[in-house]
Amino acid sequence: MIDVASALEYLHCGYSKFIVHCDLEPSNVLIDADMVGHLSDFGIAKFLGDRNSIAITSTLATIGYIAPEYGQEGLVSTRSDM
């Protein structure tokens, strides 16, 4: 969990553009030989202009793992990955 949280923190705060994964689920976390978790499958990730931006989109993630505001209204923010 710490590895995934660190990856999300980097995507949301440590890069020049803010990236929202939009499909965070167990099958998108890979474990290497040293038992370190790596975030994968950025197929529906969204770039945001600034940290507080919200993008409106019709792309949906995996049902059951999707943020309610993303599934119902298509609103994406860094809070969607939490």
Image (spheres, rainbow, N blue to C red):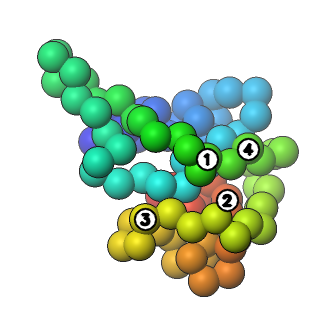
SS at badge 3:
loop
Q: Which of marks 1 and 2 is nearer the N terminus?
A: 1
Tag 2: amino acid? Ser
Residue 43 falls in image quadrant: top right
Residue 10 falls in image quadrant: top right
Cα separation between marks 4 and 3 = 19 Å
Q: Nearer the viewer, mark 1 or mark 2?
A: 1
Residue 21 at x, y percent in the picture: 55, 47
Sort mark 1 into few (<14), some (14-19) or many (20+) by Cα contacts within 10 Å.
Answer: some
Q: Report if the CB atoms under discs 4 and 1 are less than 8 Å apart.
A: yes
Residue 5 at x, y percent in the picture: 40, 40
Sort mark 3 into few (<14), some (14-19) or many (20+) by Cα contacts within 10 Å.
Answer: few
SS at badge 1:
loop
Reading the image, the residue beneath label 2 is: 77
Relative depth, front residue between 28 and 69: 28
Q: Report if the CB atoms under discs 2 and 4 are less than 8 Å apart.
A: no
Side of 54 relative to 14 (left or right): right
Q: Report if the CB atoms under discs 4 and 3 are less than 8 Å apart.
A: no
Label drawn at residue 47 = 4
Sort mark 2 into few (<14), some (14-19) or many (20+) by Cα contacts within 10 Å.
Answer: many
Reading the image, the residue beneath label 1 is: 45
- Image: 42 above or below 15: below
Asked if residue 2 shows in the view, the reply is no
* Residue positioned 71% across, 40% down in the render: 18
Q: Residue furthest right?
A: 49
Residue 50 at x, y percent in the picture: 81, 45
Q: Earlier in the sequence, mark 4 or mark 3?
A: 4
Reading the image, the residue beneath label 3 is: 62
Tag 3: amino acid? Thr
